[in-house]
Image (cartoon, rainbow, N blue to C red):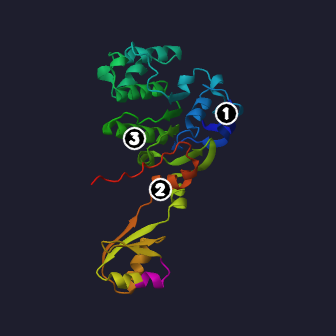
Amino acid sequence: MTSIDVQDLTKEYGGRRAVDHLTFRVLPGRVTGFLGPNGAGKSTTMRLVLGLDRPTSGSARIGGRAYAGLHEPLRRVGALLDAGAAHGSRTARDHLRALAASNRVPERRVDEVLEEAGLASVARRRVKTYSLGMRQRLGIAAALLGDPPVVLLDEPSNGLDPEGIIWIRELMRGMAREGRTILVSSHLMNETASFADHLVVLGRGRLLADTPMREFIDARVQPRVRVRTTEGAALGDLLARHGIEAVQGEDGRWTALDARVDDIGRLAATANLPILELAAEEATLEQAYLDLTTNETEFAGTPAPTRPQEA
């Protein structure tokens, strides 16, 4: 089983600790979302896993071995950390051919990943003519070149158009179904919610959460139910009598807090209240993430003061 194992990992730059005694495991067969505010240590951790930086203490191993000890590493681990890594004067195809030759990857694989990334028609153009989204696709193609069992992607949706975002989402989920180990760093909560099965969340270099995504959301955001009826006052009294906290909006719709649709529906039916709307308000990953990381943000802005309007 090829997993990523981070054990008591610490990295200090001068007097600043970017990664602080971090321990977690990324397992195959699922997409693990790697989340945290700017400066939380996500990119540093990925660099440590890939042997691009040396840890102050602790270890990061892939399939039980440090990255530096892997033979033909491109066939073991694929990674996208910087979409600008390809030399601008090379064509996309030549860039991938050089990577393939250095890791004894068959040249036919170059054309396969160019096709998979949607770049076959522009493969002989110089990289400096590529848009950000095209460079991103090339970086993903390079990560897939060795057909590796482990893939690390840092902000893979950056610069992609909607079609590209759907493509990378399906690609990651497909690789997980094949049993690969997928670690994906992202700032896009809604997008992460669409592909991640598991979450590892950092704050100021420390581990804040390591849990299935659904459990992460349910533990931090209370369920709510929207209810609308022609007899709003009677509904409010009914909910209050049963100890259910609820607030009524200006449009007359009630929101029952920490409640379930089945429970509210059963109460309304028993009281013979006509229901016009009854729906769960789905908790989001963004809500749960902000609840956890509010006090862990290193770079936080403040709203600009409201300026009085001139008469």
Q: Earlier in the sequence, mark 3 or mark 1?
A: 1
**Left or right of 170 in this view: 25:** right
Count of numbered labels shown in the rendering: 3
Of residues 114 and 81, the one nearer the viewer is: 81
Of residues 63 and 230, the one nearer the viewer is: 230
Q: Measure the alpha-carbon separation of dots 3 and 2.
A: 24 Å
Provide residue 280's location: percent of width, then percent of height. Answer: 40, 66
Q: Measure the alpha-carbon separation of dots 1 and 2.
A: 30 Å
Q: Earlier in the sequence, mark 1 or mark 2?
A: 1
| In contact (CB < 8 Å): disc 3 and disc 1 | no
Crowding at label 3, few (<14), some or many (≥20) Cα neighbours within 10 Å? some
Q: Earlier in the sequence, mark 3 or mark 2?
A: 3
Provide residue 15's location: percent of width, then percent of height. Answer: 69, 33
Vertically, is 139 above or below 281? above
| Amino acid type at image mark 1 | Lys
The residue that label 2 is drawn on is 287
| Amino acid type at image mark 3 | Glu
| Amino acid type at image mark 2 | Gln
Quadrant housing the N terminus: top right
**Left or right of 304 in this view: 218:** right
Taking the spot 68% from the left edge, 36% from the top edge, the residue there is: 10
Give the overall secondary structure of the magenta segment: helix
The residue that label 3 is drawn on is 170
**Left or right of 296 in this view: 159:** left
The residue range painted magenta reads 237-244
The circle on residue 11 is 1
Q: Report whether residue 117 is seen.
A: no
